[in-house]
Amino acid sequence: MALFKKRTVGKPGEWYYCLQHQKVEEGPECPAKDRLGPYASREAAARAIETARDRTEDWENDPRWRDGDKRDAQD
């Protein structure tokens, strides 16, 4: 058992979005499992959920990543 808990160290100028607290933070305040980032600005971190949603949609609609698609089996 560790005597000291390792604290997350933040860097000024790096912005994160905390999924657990649903807020923007400068430098990581929460564990990595609970945050998105780093982002270059507070505004970009505030749009983290929207950015992740857009990237997921792009990935799901990318024809190069359709494993097991019926169209791939016919080619």
Image (tube, rainbow, N blue to C red):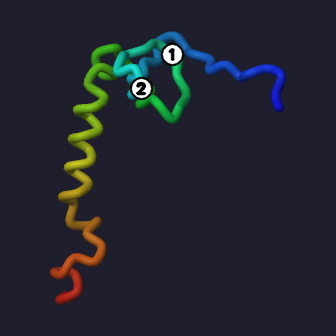
- Where residue 51 appears, as percent x and y from the top left, is 26, 34
- The image quadrant of residue 72 is bottom left
Q: Residues within 10 Å of mark 1 (few under 14, many from 20)?
A: some
Depth order, front residue of 1/75: 1
29 above or below 56? Answer: above
Q: How many angstroms separate mark 2 from mark 1 (CA)? A: 16 Å
Q: Quadrant of the C terminus?
A: bottom left
* Residue at 44% from the left image edge and 29% from the top image edge: 35
Residue where numbered disc 2 is placed: 20
- Where residue 48 appears, as percent x and y from the top left, is 30, 28
Depth order, front residue of 18/58: 18
- Where residue 41 appears, as percent x and y from the top left, is 35, 16
Q: Is residue 72 left or right of residue 9?
A: left
* Residue at 51% from the left image edge and 10% from the top image edge: 12
* Residue at 67% from the left image edge and 19% from the top image edge: 7
- Where residue 30 appears, as percent x and y from the top left, is 52, 22
Residue where numbered disc 1 is placed: 27
15 above or below 31? Answer: above
Of circles 2 and 1, the one toward us is 2
- The image quadrant of residue 52 is top left
Q: Quadrant of the N terminus?
A: top right
> Looking at the picture, which amino acid does disc 2 mark?
Gln
- The image quadrant of residue 37 is top left
